[in-house]
């Protein structure tokens, strides 16, 4: 991972490039200090005796070679690179006739120290800092033992800049580590949210699949029990309906459990979108129904003793799979409530396609028959209406449910239908 500046034009320069550039900049600054520039009466620093002699120029060339070699090693062998750069600083200082290693000769070392502190483990970074601080101290010690003067202030400035470069590198590493930990935590939380959403989706599908069929089975079983001795043919018909509804429910549950148990195959391809016709349906659940299944729902409801009438207004059009599935589930759950709780003998489903930007589904019943008592408010847990409201909310639609002014109950859902150029709404299966 790069530890250099993030600007595009600066990111093209490698750590080796930055290190060599720092050495050459320091070398150029060293020369400029020792020559008289235009407007100056004299140079800022008096050039040493060997500075422009063949031996001084040879030492500077050798130091430059060491610095270039150190820059090339920085990415692969940072410890060796730092040793080469420190040697270059000492060799490059020798012909300058100064009392301490100048800051200009230590710029490349500071760059390498930053790179090591930002990219290497703490132990290696600490060793690099101790070595970078130890070389100026050792240089002063050799001069003291030789009886020469020393530049303590200059050595302190060199040590301070080295420490600052090291601290900046460690801060960069800690920032990247924190950003990575934050990314991992966010990914884990997203996974937890996905698991929770999947559990809610499975709960809704189980409720929608089972509640309707079990309600039909319960009503048919009650009817068969009442007429089994007086009307055997009617009882046999009711039992046949019970068998068909039970088989359909069992098949749906097997498909659902099978899809949940089947692990995703690592094919390298993107997973199918919810309801993808080339995939396995919403979230891997195959053969999920849509509004085309209303005729079969009508037959099942009629067998349970409730006459279901379906009205379609406007020209039917292809719907996104998630909206088609949700619309059917809303009708199925509403009709199940009518069969189980309303006491009505009929209900009406209206599917309105007139608005190209939305689909409006309405399910209403006229209320209980004479002698029947509506049990909508007294029985059931209310999870059906909650599930319908959640489905519509996930599609960014509008849901209304309540008594009709003339009696009975009405459920209305407005589901937005995206145009072909508009991204689809989030699927309720996610």
Image (cartoon, grey):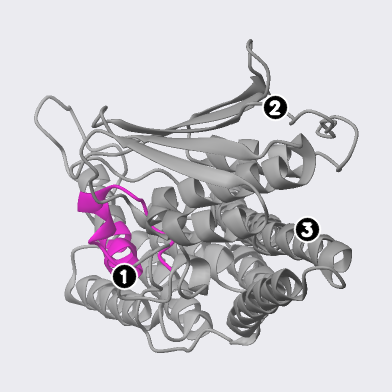
Mark seen at residue 219: 3
Where residue 393 appears, as percent x and y from the top left, is 56, 35
In reply to whether residue 5 is colored magenta, the answer given is yes
Rounded to the nearest whole Å, what is the CA distance between mark 1 and mark 3? 36 Å
Q: Nearer the viewer, mark 1 or mark 3?
A: 3
Q: Quadrant of residue 63?
A: bottom left
Rounded to the nearest whole Å, what is the CA distance between mark 1 and mark 2? 39 Å
- Reading the chain from its start, which is encountered first: label 2 or label 3? 3
Q: Which residues are magenta?
A: 1-23
Secondary structure beneath label 3: helix
Vertical placement of residue 157 versus 218, above or below: above
Residue 11 in sight: yes
Q: Which residue is mark 1?
A: 277
Q: Quadrant of residue 353?
A: top left
Residue at left 51%, top 68%?
A: 283
- Reading the chain from its start, which is encountered first: label 1 or label 2? 1
Q: Quadrant of residue 201?
A: bottom right
- Reading the chain from its start, which is encountered first: label 1 or label 3? 3
Rounded to the nearest whole Å, what is the CA distance between mark 2 and mark 3? 18 Å
Residues packed near mark 3 inside 10 Å, few (<14), some (14 to 19) or many (20 plus): some
In reply to whether residue 69 is colored magenta, the answer given is no
Residues packed near mark 1 inside 10 Å, few (<14), some (14 to 19) or many (20 plus): few
Is residue 294 toward the left or the right of residue 174 in the image? left
Where residue 208 appears, as percent x and y from the top left, is 65, 56
Residue at left 58%, top 73%?
A: 120
Image quarter in which the N terminus is found? bottom left
């Amino acid at each position: 991972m790069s530890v250099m500046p993030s600007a595009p034009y600066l990111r093209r320069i490698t750590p080796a490039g930055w290190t060599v550039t720092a050495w050459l900049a320091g070398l150029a600054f060293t020369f400029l200090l020792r020559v008289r520039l235009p407007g100056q009466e004299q140079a800022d620093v008096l050039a040493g005796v060997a500075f422009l002699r063949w031996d001084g120029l040879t030492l500077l060339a050798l130091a430059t070679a060491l610095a270039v070699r150190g820059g090339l090693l920085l990415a692969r062998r940072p410890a060796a690179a730092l040793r080469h750069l420190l040697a270059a600083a000492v060799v490059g200082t020798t012909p300058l006739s100064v009392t301490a290693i100048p800051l200009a000769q230590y710029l490349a070392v500071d760059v390498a120290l930053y790179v090591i502190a930002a990219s290497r483990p703490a132990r290696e970074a600490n060793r690099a800092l101790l070595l970078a601080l130890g070389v100026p101290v050792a240089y002063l010690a050799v001069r003291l033992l030789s009886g020469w003067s020393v530049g303590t202030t200059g050595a302190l400035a060199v040590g301070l800049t080295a420490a600052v470069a090291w601290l900046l590198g460690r801060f960069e590493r800690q920032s990247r580590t924190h950003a990575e930990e934050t990314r991992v935590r966010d990914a884990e939380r997203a996974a937890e949210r996905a698991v929770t959403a999947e559990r809610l989706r499975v709960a809704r599908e189980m409720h929608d699949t089972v509640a309707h069929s079990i309600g039909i089975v319960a009503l048919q079983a009650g009817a068969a029990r009442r007429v089994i001795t007086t009307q055997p043919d009617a009882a046999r018909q009711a039992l046949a309906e019970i068998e068909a509804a039970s088989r359909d429910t069992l098949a749906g549950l097997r498909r659902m459990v099978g899809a949940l148990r089947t692990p995703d195959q690592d094919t390298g391809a993107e997973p199918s979108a919810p309801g993808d016709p080339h995939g396995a349906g919403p979230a891997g659940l195959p053969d999920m129904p849509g509004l085309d299944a209303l005729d079969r729902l009508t037959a099942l409801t009629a067998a349970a003793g409730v006459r279901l009438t379906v009205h379609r207004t406007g020209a039917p059009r292809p719907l996104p799979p998630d909206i088609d599935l949700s619309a059917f589930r809303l009708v199925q759950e509403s009709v199940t409530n009518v069969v189980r709780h309303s006491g009505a003998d009929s209900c009406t489903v209206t599917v309105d396609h007139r608005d190209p930007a939305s689909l409006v589904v309405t399910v209403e019943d006229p209320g209980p028959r004479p002698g029947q008592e509506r049990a909508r408010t007294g029985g059931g847990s209310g999870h059906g209406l909650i599930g319908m409201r959640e489905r519509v909310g996930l599609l960014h639609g509008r849901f209304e449910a309540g008594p009709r002014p003339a009696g009975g109950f009405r459920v209305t859902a407005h589901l937005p239908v995206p145009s072909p150029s508009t991204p689809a709404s989030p699927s309720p299966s996610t």
